[in-house]
Image (cartoon, grey):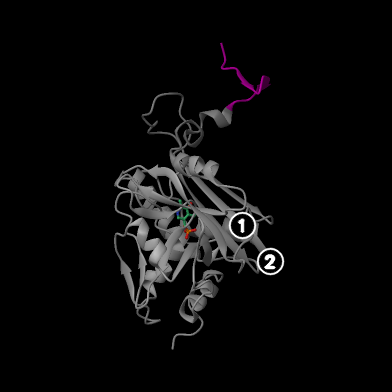
Amino acid sequence: MPARALLNGEPAEGQALLDRSCQYGDGLFETIAVRSGRPCLWSRHVDRLLSGCDRLGIAAPDPDLLLAEAGELVAGRQTAVLKIVISSGPSQRGYARDPNARVTRWLRCDDQAERPAGTDEPLLAQECRTRLGSQPLLAGIKHLNRLEQVLASRELQTGRQEGILCNQQGRPVEGIACNILLRFDDHYLTPPLRDAGVAGTVRQLVIDKQELLDLPLRIQDTQMDALYRAEGLFMMSSLRGIQPVAKLGEHAYPLTRRPDDLGVLHDACFTFGGEPACAD
Ligand SMILES: Cc1ncc(COP(=O)(O)O)c(C=O)c1O
């Protein structure tokens, strides 16, 4: 007998259900800001995607093909969001992959940003009880298993846009959908991502441009109390750029505007090449 499927009780083709991204989250994704018809921080997104493919053993898509397909979708759009999903392809059942399966590649561009992209409004954040699991094999890549973030999002109180996620030892790692940057008197700090967290394209931009912009940056483990001692807390992601946090719980930060160096990097987040406009 041929396979039969129901979707919400209605007869359906059921082909999508065979895809391993749907069955097991066996794949990767990128969420990319689009400005003036171009995908922002393009090569950083492609680099992370390709490194994720390498780490998961998925045949990597051709970057030129990706750019051509992305270009087709983003053409003519002023402010949009491009999403790329790569999955290891279809398989019938069982965790082992079918060695002959063809990798699946989706691209979708939507004018409607999920959140206001790059707005300057300082965020309201909270601590989350959900903790990130420890898995060095998956740390850094943007794989499709995001249940920790889904659970953490359910915790968000009304009016709070972001949450701080700690690891199993209670050390802060990142936000729900962003990386974090703390500002102290004489330095910035972002936590390492050895066992958990996504190596964000914006976080990497900040790391790569620290010398150019004379940014005293430390990649260092920290504790929750440091978040309350910091002068400022910033959330970094492709859609937000580098956004200040006004409040963490009831704690109000003294610094709720981007200092000039972060402002330059924030603007660079919304360009194709990600090069800061002022280098001196
Ligand atoms: C869990 C998580 N961490 C960090 C980030 C930041 O990554 P990027 O700067 O590439 O947007 C994201 C972005 O969606 C994310 O979902």
Q: In which quarter of the image is the N terminus?
A: top right
Asked whether, in this view, residue 204 is left or right of residue 81, the answer is: left
Circle 2 residue: 78
Instruction: Please tell me how crowded label 2 is: few (under 14), some (14-19), or many (20+) other residues with Cα within 10 Å.
Output: few
Instruction: Report if residue 29 lies within the magenta region.
Output: no
Residue at 61% across, 57% down = 81
Label 1 beta carbon within 8 A of ligand 1: no
Q: Which amino acid does label 2 sit on?
A: Gln
User: Where is residue 36 drawn, in percent x and y?
Assistant: 65, 69
Q: Is residue 239 visible?
A: no
Report crowding for label 1: few under 14, some 14 to 19, many 20 or more residues within 10 A (C-alpha).
many
Q: Position of residue 141 (x, y in %)?
A: 39, 51
* 18 with respect to 8 (left or right): left
Figure quadrant of the C terminus: bottom left
In the image, residue 174 sits, relative to residue 87, either above or below, namely below
Hey, what amino acid is under mark 1? Val
Segment colored magenta: 1-14
